[in-house]
Image (cartoon, coloured by chain):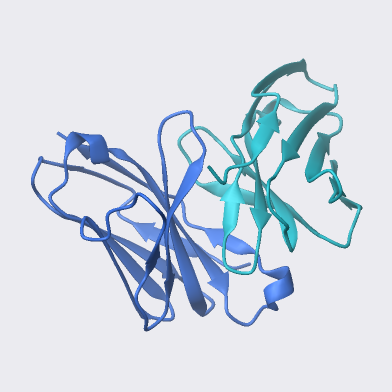
């Protein structure tokens, strides 16, 4: 099956620093990757959609200058939380869509998530 | 908010019983998917049902879809303690999926 990895799985950083999270599709080409955040006991909220080689599309209310997304290749997307603050502490999950699948039938493959704690 | 709603928010049943979760969504979809999430972990894809399908089975899972009511249900039969998790529906358009609020299922051994 399709596998998506995330690195790191957890990270603790000090307020004001930046943190980069990687999302990789291991055995398929991901033309589109999605970034979600999840607060404790809540659902996933889509932050942005990134297509390989183009700028990410951010959801309403998500600061694009704070959450920098780069999708430089068909197997790698990165999310950088800049100048992190305690309120950015959350569970960040990426997903990737197999570019060879029909749009009708697309299934997202999720990474295991990254837990960010900002102190 | 574009999020769908799930019902119930929490469900506690005995092992062996059936568990039914419902999901409502707001916009037209191409497909609807159900995911499971164990506490603090990533999501596991369970099943995808297309908008032109009404029912789909996968092992102990049965999913129905009623596009006229913009609703779906997930039935887990003969539940096991290992089914304890949160379950989310995700309604899909061409570009992205929108997650429901989730149902937290507890199966008591």
As rendered, which of B76 and A107 lies closer to the eye?
A: A107
- B46 vs B60, left or right, is left
Residue A27 x %, y %: 53, 75
**Vertical relation: A73 (above or below) B61:** below
Residue found at the very far right of the displayed protein: B54
Q: Is residue A6 left or right of residue A64?
A: right
Residue at left offset 49%, top offset 44%: A44
Which color has been applied to chain B in this rendered view?
cyan
**Total marks in image:** 0
Task: Give residue B52's position: percent from left, percent from top.
Answer: 88, 62
The percent coordinates of residue A59 (x first, y second) are: 42, 56
Q: Quadrant of the C terminus of chain A?
A: top left
* Quadrant for the N terminus of chain A in the image: bottom right
Residue drawn where x is 45% and y is 35% of the image: B40
Residue drawn at 46 percent across, 62 percent down: A34
Q: Is residue A30 among the parts visible in the rendering?
A: yes
| Colour of chain A as rendered | blue
Q: Quadrant of residue A81?
A: bottom left
Q: Give residue B75's quadrant in the image.
A: top right
Eyeballing the image, is B39 above or below A66?
above
Q: Residue A100 appears in which quarter of the rendering?
A: bottom right
Residue A20 placed where, x, y %? Answer: 23, 59
């Amino acid at each position: 099956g399709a596998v998506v990895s995330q690195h790191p799985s957890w990270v603790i950083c000090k307020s004001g620093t930046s943190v980069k999270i990687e999302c990789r599709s291991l055995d398929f080409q991901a033309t589109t990757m999605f970034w979600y955040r999840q607060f404790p006991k809540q659902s996933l909220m889509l932050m942005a959609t990134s297509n390989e080689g183009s700028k990410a599309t951010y959801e309403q209310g998500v600061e694009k200058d704070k959450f920098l997304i780069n999708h430089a290749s068909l197997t790698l997307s990165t999310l950088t939380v800049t100048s992190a603050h305690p309120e950015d502490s959350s569970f960040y999950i990426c997903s990737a869509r197999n570019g060879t699948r029909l749009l009708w039938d697309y299934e997202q493959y999720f990474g295991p998530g990254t837990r960010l704690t900002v102190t | 908010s574009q999020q769908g709603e799930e019902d119930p928010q929490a469900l506690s049943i005995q092992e062996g019983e059936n568990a039914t979760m419902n999901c409502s969504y707001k916009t037209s979809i191409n497909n609807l998917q159900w995911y499971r999430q164990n506490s603090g972990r990533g999501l596991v894809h369970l099943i995808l049902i297309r908008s032109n399908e009404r029912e789909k089975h996968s092992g102990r899972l049965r999913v129905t879809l009623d596009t006229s009511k913009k609703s779906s249900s997930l039935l887990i039969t003969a539940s096991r303690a290992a089914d304890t998790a949160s379950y989310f529906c995700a309604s899909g358009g061409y570009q992205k999926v929108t997650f429901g609020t989730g149902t937290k299922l507890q199966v008591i051994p």
